Image (spheres, helix red, strand yellow):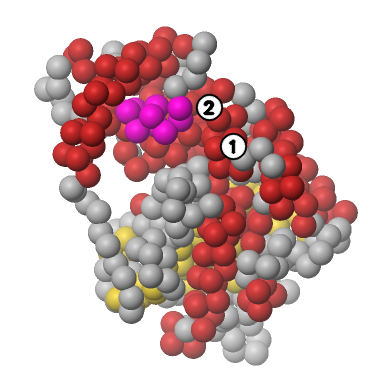
Amino acid sequence: MRFLPALTLSALAASVIAAPILAQERDRPSRECRAEVVQLCGSDRSEIRSCLIENADSLSSECSAEIRALAQQRRGERGERGQRRGGGNREERRGGERRGSQTAGMKVDATIFYGAHSRQTVDYFAAKGEPQADLSGNPPPLVLFIHGGGWKFGDHKVSVVNKPKHFTESGYAFASTGYRLLPDAPVEEQARDIGLAIAVLRGQADALGFDPDRIVLMGHSAGAHLAALVSTDPQYAGDSFDAIQGVIPLDGAGYDIARNMASASGRAALLYADVFGDDPARQAALSPITHVGGPDAPHWLILYVAGRERSGDQSRLLAESLTSAGADAQTVAVPDTDHRQLNQNLGLSGDAATEQVDAFLARVFAD
């Protein structure tokens, strides 16, 4: 059976969940299929697209067949419907710096623009808890978050969820960076965006109020891959590379691209082929594991969803390589969660992954 392209499936499923209740039933999958998508990915439309790119193979064959049939039915009206949906919440921001906007229910202390593209922006949240300063009186460290979305989707504002409140109240500065996505920018350019965001943030560290030499990168899914790549290949962060003191990848599965592609199937295989191509040299160059053993960030906490085989395999492989090269690296399998919830729940009281992250940060910044 020929697979529906991941982009079509994810976009349709997102529109299915967001469709009005009074929509005709013939235009929507069955209630059971809609419930299946919600159970897998939640009901947040901005999260459904990226979730299905990674996890669409988890849908039942019946639900996948329904969505494929509706995709064919809607193909002729896709342009018209896309135009109706597209006028809503897009926000273009170019140049300068803006203060006082809202993200995840919290006031953004500063929005930093590091390029001309509307996605080349960083939301910055100042530390509000007891300052995590060292004995020399340095300002608080920075946790910089990189969103996921299969290198094609995602929003640095939506995906932070509980993180700004938790980390700033714990005494850390927190920032969430956007970056250009496919098809506008290949993965190489996305990694360069992350490196440039770090450099621009560090250049404004005194005004923003954080220590430019104590930064931890955290990334979810595709963002986990980008965080690991930038933290093992110095070409992307350049002079800012040594400021990366730690890395927290969240349920990534792209640390060895060729190995992942060899074991992937279905839509996951289509995604990686589309993003990374078929050139072994390029796949290797974009694999963090290729660069381990050169300059590497010194501390790593690699979290993955327990039972998610591809993520677990890739996480352990990266940790073993880093440890062999002399870095401090550990993996933690997080139980009773899924790919989306691991990111969504980070920062909540009692969350197992949050407790691991808090202990890791305290240890890294105590060095």
> Where is the C terminus found, in terms of image quarters?
bottom right
Q: Secondary structure at mark 2?
A: helix
Q: Looking at this view, is 137 or 270 the one in front?
A: 270
Residue at (55% x, 37% y) in the render: 274
Q: Where does the image place residue 80, in percent across and percent down from the top left?
A: 18, 33
Q: Position of residue 176 (x, y in %)?
A: 45, 63
Q: CA distance from mark 1 to mark 2?
A: 9 Å
In the picture of the structure, the residue carrying the numbered disc 1 is 272
The answer to if 240 sits in the magenta stretch is: no
Q: Amino acid at mark 2?
A: Arg
**Residue 358 visible (yes or no):** no
- Main SS of the magenta part reads helix
Q: Amino acid at mark 1?
A: Tyr
Residues rendered magenta in the picture: 5-13
- Give the residue at x 54% y 59%: 189
In the visual, does 96 lie left or right of 174? left
Dividing the picture into quadrants, the one containing residue 329 is bottom right
